[in-house]
Structure formats: C-alpha cells, structure tokens
C-alpha cells in the first residue's frame, strides 16, 4: 500500500500527512495572529514537531508567516481547519 501511495503522491504517507498539517497551519497563521502553540495543537502536532515540520516544508520558521509577521501571537480563538484538497 505504501508503494502505491508513493506512486500516486510522490511522497510516503507520513510525510504527506505532515505536509497537509503544515498547509493547514500556514492558512491559520496567515489569516490571523494565532499563537504558534495553539496552531500546532490544532493541526495535531507538538510545538517542537510543528516547528521542525514547518521549517522542513516551508523553508522558514513559523514566526515568519502571519497576518502581521512578528506581532504578538497570544490569546486568539482558532477557527476550524478545513480539510486540504
């Protein structure tokens, strides 16, 4: 099954899932100044895992993405994440 998945998507299932989570997180970070730890939890990652996968996928730290890039990211309520696709 993994071989078929890689043939269809070009990446292993775990990497594909991580990329989908980071894509959803990027939408949240771009739409408002949500706290990074809340975004990480919303997409199902620990903060450390989120930072690792974000940098690997996006090529920059999550703090460089956002509605005001560098603004205070505390205390905002997160909207629901829409499925990618």
Image: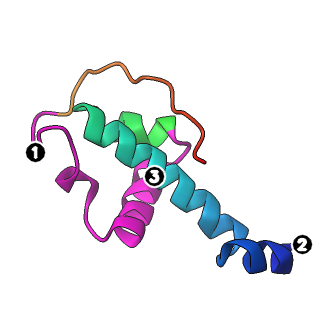
Q: Position of residue 7 (x, y in %)?
A: 76, 80
At 35% from the left edge and 18% from the top edge, which residue is drawn? 77
Residue 23, numbered label: 3
Q: Position of residue 19 (x, y in %)?
A: 53, 61
| Secondary structure of residue under mark 1 | loop
Is residue 37 found left or right of 13 in the rendered image? left
**Closer to the eye: label 3 or 1:** 3
Which residues are the magenta region? 43-72
- Residue designated by label 2: 1
Spatial CA distance of label 3 from label 2 is 24 Å
- Is 46 a magenta residue? yes
Is residue 14 found left or right of 21 in the rendered image? right
Look at the picture and state if 32 lies above or below 84. Answer: above
At 48% from the left edge and 38% from the top edge, which residue is drawn? 41
- Residue designated by label 1: 70
Give the mark nearest the N terminus, 3 or 1: 3
State if disc 2 and disc 3 touch (CB < 8 Å): no
Q: Count residues near mark 1 (Cα–Cα under 10 Å), then give few for <14, some for 14-19, many for 20+.
A: few
Asked if one can make out residue 44 in the rendered structure from this viewpoint, the answer is yes
Location of residue 59 (image quadrant): bottom left
| Secondary structure of residue under mark 3 | helix
**Closer to the eye: label 2 or 1:** 2
Give the mark nearest the N terminus, 2 or 1: 2
Asked if one can make out residue 35 in the rendered structure from this viewpoint, the answer is no
Look at the picture and state if 55 lies above or below 25. Answer: below
Q: Count residues near mark 3 (Cα–Cα under 10 Å), then give few for <14, some for 14-19, many for 20+.
A: some
Is residue 2 found left or right of 6 in the rendered image? right
């Amino acid at each position: 099954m993994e071989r078929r998945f890689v043939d269809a998507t070009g990446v292993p299932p775990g990497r594909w899932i991580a990329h989908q989570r980071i894509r959803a997180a990027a939408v949240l970070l771009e739409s408002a100044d949500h706290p990074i730890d809340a975004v990480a939890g919303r997409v199902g990652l620990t903060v450390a895992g989120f930072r690792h996968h974000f940098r690997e996928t996006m090529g920059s730290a999550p703090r460089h993405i956002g509605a005001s890039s560098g603004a205070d990211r505390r205390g905002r309520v997160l909207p629901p994440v829409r499925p990618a696709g």
